[in-house]
Amino acid sequence: MSAHNSVAHLDSETKVDQYVKSRSYWETALLRIRQDRLTMVALTILLCITMMSALAPFITSNILHLDPNQTNPTQNFLPPGTGPYILGTDDIGRDQLARLLHAGGVSMRIGIFGAAFSLSIGVSMGVISGYFGGMVDDVMNWLITTIDSIPSLYLLILFAAIFSPSAETLILVISLISWTSSMRLIRGQTLALREQEYVIAARALGANAWRIMFVHIVPNLISITIISMTLTIAGLILTESALSYLGLGVQPPQATWGNMLSKSQQFFRQGPHLVIFPGLMIFITVLCAYVIGDGLRDAFDPTIRNR
Amino acid sequence: MTQYVIRRLIQAIPTFFGITIISYALMLGTPGGPIKAMFFGQRIPPEEIERRELALGVNDPLPIQYLRWLVGDDWMRRDTDGDGIADTAFLIPLDVNGDGEPEPPGDRYGILRGDFGRSFFHKRPAIDVLVERLPATLELGFSGLIVGLVLGLPIGVLAAINQGRWFDQVSRVGAVVVNALPNFWLALLLLLLFGSTLGWLPLGNRCRTTLDDTCPPITERLEYLILPTVVLAAGAVATYSRYMRASMLDVVNQDFIRTAYSKGLSSRVVWLRHGLRNAMLPIATLLGPSITFLLGGAVITETVFSWPGVGRLAVNAVGQRDFPVVMIVVIYAAMATILGYLLSDLMYAILDPRIRYEK
Amino acid sequence: MKPFYRLAMVACLCLLMGVTVWGQDAPLGFAEGDPVIEPNFGDDIKTLNPIIVADGPSQDVINRLFPVLIQYNPFTLAWNPGEPRGLAESWTISDDGRVYTFQLSDEYYWNDGTPVTTADIMWFWNATINEDTNSNNQLLIDQVESMVAVDDYTLEVTFKVASCTALDTLNPVTAVPAHAFEEWFGSDLAGMEDSEFNLDMPVTGLDFTFDNFRPGEQVTLRAYENYPDPVEGSVIPAGYIYKTVTDQVVQMEQFYAGELTWLESVPQSSMEEVRTRSDAGEFQIFEAPANTIRFLSFNLADPENPQDAVDEDGNPLDQGVHPILGDKRVRQALALAMNYDEINEGAFFGNGIPVASHVLPTSWAYPEDLAPYPFDPDAAGALLDEAGWTDEDGDGIRECNGCETTEDGTPLSFKVETNAGNVSQEALYTILQDQWSQIGVDAQVSFLDFNILVDSLLAQNYDAIGLFWNFSIPANPDDATDVFTPSADVIGSGFNTGSYNNPRVTELLEEARLLPGCDQAERAAIYGEMYEILADELPWLWLSTSTVMSAAQGNLENWDPQAGFARWNIDAWTSQSR
């Protein structure tokens, strides 16, 4: 929860000019990322986790030959490495690895789709508000100030109590609450871009507002959006786990890393592996996302020369 | 300055109304409702439930309920001749339950007049329920904020001074690592390590359990504050140190620092006297978000450490559908945040000689 | 920039040292003169006023403060005159069974010196029947015709009908200090809920007095030294503290560290460890069957069109039939397909107790010969085949092929809703779902917020809902009247939410309740027949109860918890001299 609001902060003061010369700019950024070993490692790990989570049904049925929902209560709390159970079994004898993979699918879905939804609201609102200004901007400003004034966890608890959450409703709820920060960011950028010469020129030539927004402004916001995306994914995965601890997260039988971790707390004496692995999955995923976010920011920022 | 403060306060009014509308709409959307959860497991005839629902006013049209909650209903249904029965009605009928008899006059004043209603479950005014939880929350929130600043700012400065060297790298990695752990897990791990395994620190709660009426003064029970503060401040330390680092680096590249160097001042003087002072400016803007963040983070921390604060109250109240308490908690939190943002702006105005807010 | 490092190092060192110095000696076990500390995992207390109390934590504290009219014996679990905290020394029953005359003890005093008399009971009664107090004791109001104080120590209670459950009905009757209550609330009963005295009760009548309530932290009671009737001659503990601990893991750690004197109920996942450590003498434990049964309520009527059992004039309404669960054979098959041993292992760590009826083995009405359904998936399959549910398309889920309750082709698939946030409940239903899928039944389990669950339960639009049933103590099998008779089948309020209706069951309940002479063996036989019918027709599937384990620090003496009345002698709890 906390991380979402704290580290996931973008430097909104970054100058706008740098996003303009598109081709060489992207090439430089790509080059920089390739040279940044830490980011590359994080990227590789995160891609692996995402792939494994996405392919969870295939992996569990064809490689592990295990059903994540197959209970076997007489075989519970088996430590990792027992028989076919690579990461052991949980309190009712389900294979932990299979469940972690499936849970990963749900957790990553919450992170990725939640971030995507949240950003699409944030970006479109931000561009519209920043470009048109005036009344639109005032109303929008009022809306985000209002939403931001209520601590987001309080709002989430309220929402979660209303829609007894499944992964899908949680994605919806989280994105409805978390779009404000990206909106602020994009709005600031749009305000600056609007005054760029080529935008003014386009306007003078009579291009219509929507065309200017989509052709001239939005492409220049892609890099900042990507950075924001990685950080939001990390924040959302953490948020889901916090909600799970309060009993308001995704409910079983749908497993997420968050509800696996919070449920297993009381088994930490019987099966430490049930606490360690889900916790580790969250930790690694979030850490990688942060590192990538950091790396991307550096890569996209021409003012940083050599680090 | 006064004018500026007044203008900012006026700007906060629409925000405040926005908050009341959003939170009230959410509350009403909650399935289950207060009555059913309240009476589950008890043998109460439907007429009785209806009577109590009526008394709580949960069956009126939604805008009326919102209005009653906001500004009260004593003006909606008035008793002009003093016989205890309403005879003048506005917006709502005299005879609410349709039994042919008019009801007693409205007795709610609404939140704008300080009446947050009575907690459905605590059977006390909701505001009392909130107020008795405030000291604990403020205690934890402030210590979190102070630790966040006291550790975060120097770490940020040190990191900036040592840019690219090991301290810089360690602090940056540390910030990310701490933030990548789920908050409740970090809390439980610390509690099990320091409280259970090592036995150095208490296992949650706000003070030693004794027969006394109150907790001793805060100085005599600091050990109870350590772990919750650490967990709460972990995120704040990370944020502040990174902000401070960025802000410091920003400042030292500016002209006046170069001038200071060229005047022959020692680097320590330059960094501390010129750099630090100017780098502190952006930090002022962090105060507002910090308050929101500390309040939000406290929900988890308070639950793990059995800390008797507002965050835990909010979670319980939502679970019980205790509408008045949930609403007052949300509004309190929102007001604190608005105030935080206001303070941020004021500090910024005071600290930055370039900004003048007069007129 | 060396000074900075030095400064940082010093700061770190100071912090570390501070931490070590603060590390205090944890109190080990329980010592003479200590208060008894019991954790409260639930919520804060809401009121200490017995007239308006409606929640568990408040009732727990009230039980420490106010004497009641009648109290049951902690060992026999039967109503018994002269028990501690029970005012009635003896009682007589009139020939027609309607009038109970209680003789009250003259040894009880409020802590301000006023004797406890019938006036105190009468004040409770008059406030309860007054609509203004919104009393929750509806059963008491319904069954008791009148209560009259004959003299200061004689009370006459007249019931509307002579019933064998009369004493059970009087369970909530509590003495309140009439002189004080009259002064505080007398003029304005409707305003009673708002009174500040509800959370600051200066006048009490038992071995502990109320001291203070710190919201979110603790409720503190102090020993009342002048209490006339302690179990061991004097009130030994210095006080009694209900301490709020909101995380279950932390609660256990606090107990292990000696910060909690005792736990009324150890979480299932920790029982094994506590057992092992109690063998080593570190703790003492007491285990007994819990007075809670987990059940699955089937909706027998059409969930699409929920109806009350009878209309306003008492004529039966057509409630339809549930397309799947309306057939008794399907319900029986579900029971036969349940492998209890697996459930016990996975959900209760081996601490589960199978049940065949909703009465506990400790009760006088327990039907000895009634066995739970055996685990027999073949028989379950055969029953489903017979009922016309077979899997023709080979997808692993049966469809209706000539079943009686719905159209052909309908898959044997229904929703099971249960409460979220309980680990045992999660495990239980996850395993059950798995076991049922083995016989071709698709149960879609969802775990919901309690409020939402209650909504759907009372609206009667569910397929099957799994919940708990907490029994009153002493056991009162008449509870079933509120659950399995048409009179309780009212949408929005009744508990016969599955619309079960068997006239014979209604008749048996009535017969047992009104049996002349109230012979317990005869009543047990009548209830026995009812349990058999219910076990055959399975309107609710009884899943399990479990062992409840109370645990205390090893050196706590005189700790003698009894099932359902663990604190009966707390004023005698003391520590071994070490």
Image (tube, coloured by chain):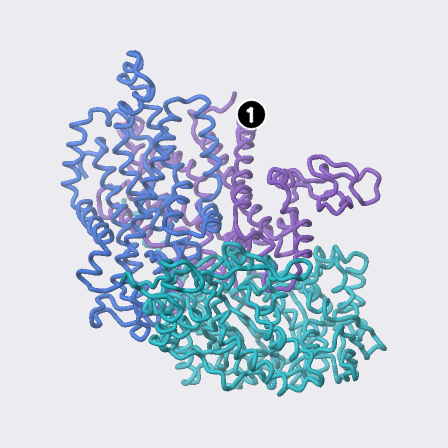
Chain colours: A blue, B purple, C cyan
Give me the residue at 16% from left, 36% from top.
Answer: A30
Q: Is residue C444 left or right of residue C192?
A: left
Disc 1 secondary structure class: helix
* Residue beneath disc 1: B3
Direction front: furthest residue: C402
Q: Nearer the viewer, residue C427 or C16?
A: C427
Amino acid identity at mark 1 = Gln
Does the image show residue B223?
no
Is C401 rendered above or below residue C1? below
Tell me the quarter of the image containing the N terminus of chain C. top left
Can you give x and y, in whole percent of width and height, for residue C304 in the image? 50, 54
Which percent across, then down, holds residue C25?
A: 45, 72
B60 and A262: which is toward the camera? B60
Q: Measured from the top left, where is residue B34 in percent x and y?
A: 59, 53
- Chain that bears disc 1: B
Question: Residue at (52%, 44%) from the top-left corner?
Answer: B26
Residue at the top extreme, as displayed:
A205
Q: Is any atom of residue C395 visible in this view?
A: yes
Seen in the picture, residue A73 relative to B171 is either above or below; the reply is: below
